[in-house]
Image (tube, rainbow, N blue to C red):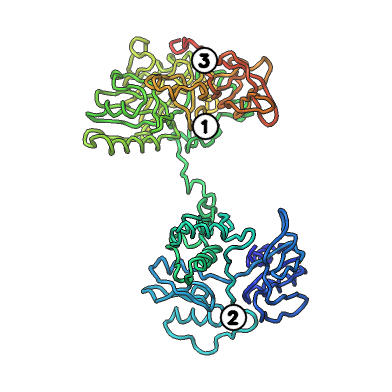
Amino acid sequence: MSADAALQYLRRFAVVPGRRIIVATNNDSAYAVAAALFAAEAEVTVVDTRVNAPAIDGGIVCLSGRVVSRARGRQAVASVTLDDGTILACDCLLVSGGWTPTIHLYAQAKGKLAWSDEVAAFVPGAKVDGIAVAGAAAGLVGLGQVLASGVEAASGQPAAAGAPRNTGIEATLRILPAWPRTRQHGRTWIDYQNDVTSKDIELAARENFVSVEHLKRYTTLGMATDQGKTSNLNGLALMAEITGRAIPEVGTTIYRPPYVPVPLSTLAGPRAGALMTPIRRLPLESVHRGENAVFQEYGGWLRPAYYGNADAGEAIRHEAEITRRSGALFDGSTLGKIEVIGPQAAEFVDFIYYNTMSTLKVARCRYGFMLSESGVVYDDGILARLGDDRFVVSCSTSHVAGVHMRLEEWRQDRFDRARIQIHNATSQFATLTVSGPRSRELVETLGLGLALDDASLPHMALAGGSFGNNPVRVARVSFTGDRSYEISIRADRAAGLWAAMKEAGGPLGMATIGLEALMILRAEKGYIVIGKDTDGTTMPQDLGVDGPRIKRTSDNTANRKQLVGLRLADGEPPLATGAHAVERHGGHKRSIGFVTSSYWSPTLRRPVALALIEGGSNRHGETLDFQHLGTIVTATISPPCAFDPDGERLNA
């Protein structure tokens, strides 16, 4: 390791990198490291390439005029070999080859570099307007020189007499260049991070990549995280020797920001939470808190996970059970409500969605997928048609911003911007949902002024009404598999509607449910959550929606992971989400898919699970082993829908 790195370990962390240490150097700065390590009770030997090495006190051994030619050991240093064949046992080799000034800011300001034989490095050359260079950045070593240059840079005047004297080994670098040589035996490492050796640079020269820019890209010299700070100069010196040029003639690559590595902690920030990613809040958050809701973050929104003081699992199962028995209220305000308006709106939604949407009748809804440009499912949701030239895109909670951005991108890049307008109205409306066998009874008590019979408002239809003096939009769509109504109202008027729904739901035996219960209900029906029950390769046909892609045989290969349900033997607990389905081939096991959702169903009194399995649509009835943390459980592949497969409860 570098000698200065060892000193950092010692000074900052009180860590000695070894007990029998060799310090290989060609300059005076390594002696301070040797003295500090010796004071920490390490056995230290300095191997100095210079024949006139400085005198050093104490028990430090100094070998002048010698070079470490090889390090020996496997997985750890055991000894080094000197150029005269001497073998020195050690457990740590420190290398000090000199210093390169940090000249990046100067170079980025269009400053021209100059070569300094005194420090064997590039230093700032001609003065650049608005830039003053001082101290080590100017290639100065002695403390007195550094301080004097700082005064002059700041004031524009030479430093007054009386600056600190340079004494001891810090007075001068006294460097004797020790560049790597050609045709060395074994490996001579140039760039430790990118594993560039002297032979790589020699090969670059033979291939005529002798320009400094070509050298960098051919060998990846200096392209690691230190941006060449420990390697570039050695590489340039070796190329200079190979091509018979001086190091300044080889030149340097262009210095680009940043001039020091950016720590990952800087990119991550100080875990600033809402300051980094502001939490989005429901219009009725205070109401839910008053009803004893337990909040968690979902898709950037703070939402009720469940209600009450009972055990979380017990409360969630109770909410799911009561929804199937009578019904439940749910705050679905986070669902996207993005309006697409204009003469080209129908053509636009056809382009955006996987399935055809322009044939949708006014006041009707249709489920659809949005795909990425590679055909992978990006989002799903309901599209509602409010008029001939007006649609509402209801997208997943976590994808509202992304879908809005995609709509705007395609509107601007492909369509006539004067004939389509996009308006994200998600935060303007609250959407309050009632679901379950008695949901129609509840909605009838609200006096919304619209017909609720199945002929007037069938499943996947919507109608306008009013609550008090406030217009509402009622959509009969379901994410539970039961009859459901989503009522959208101005966000600032939602509290009154919610109170009326709560009052009406009590005598009907209804409960308020959180998102965790909803996840159980939708999994019983095999309804997916994008990003949970899909991955970065899932296409519509993998979810049972073939459509136009059925003609593309490349997308219908048997080994594609497809959505299935899983049935466990009686008495088995739920599968672990993420458990892998494994097949055995000889003595080896191979993953052929994984569990995406898994819950205990209080309605079915057994576990339900969804999974993505290779060729899953053709494997119903097949039994597979699922492995998780060393435990193997057997499950049978089944259709994704485990509850009410004929959909009778949607109209019950």
Coordinates of residue 605 in the picture (x, y in percent): 62, 15
Which residue in the protein does label 1 denote?
304
Q: What is the quadrant of the C terminus in the image?
A: top left
- Precedes in sequence: disc 2 or disc 3: 2
Please report contact status of discs 3 and 1: CB closer than 8 Å, yes or no.
no
Q: Is residue 180 above or below residue 613?
A: below
Coordinates of residue 327 in the picture (x, y in percent): 50, 17
Q: Is residue 641 visible?
A: no
Coordinates of residue 314 in the picture (x, y in percent): 63, 25
Coordinates of residue 467 in the picture (x, y in percent): 35, 24
Residue lying at 34% horizontally and 32% vertically, measured from the top left: 338
| Of 148 and 454, the residue lying toward us | 148
Q: What is the quadrant of the N terminus in the image?
A: bottom right
In space, the residues marked 2 and 1 are separated at their CA atoms by: 68 Å
Residue lying at 37% horizontally and 25% vertically, measured from the top left: 354
In space, the residues marked 3 and 1 are separated at their CA atoms by: 21 Å
Is label 3 in a helix, a strand or a loop? loop
Which residue in the protein does label 3 denote?
326
Q: Mark 2 or mark 1: which is in front?
A: 2
User: Disc 1 marks which amino acid?
Assistant: Pro
| Of 558 and 602, the residue lying toward us | 558
The tag on residue 261 is none
- Precedes in sequence: disc 2 or disc 1: 2
The tag on residue 172 is 2
Please report contact status of discs 2 and 1: CB closer than 8 Å, yes or no.
no
Is label 1 in a helix, a strand or a loop? strand
Q: Residue furthest bottom?
A: 161
Neighbour class for label 2 at 10 Å: few (<14), some, many (≥20)? some
User: Disc 2 marks which amino acid?
Assistant: Thr
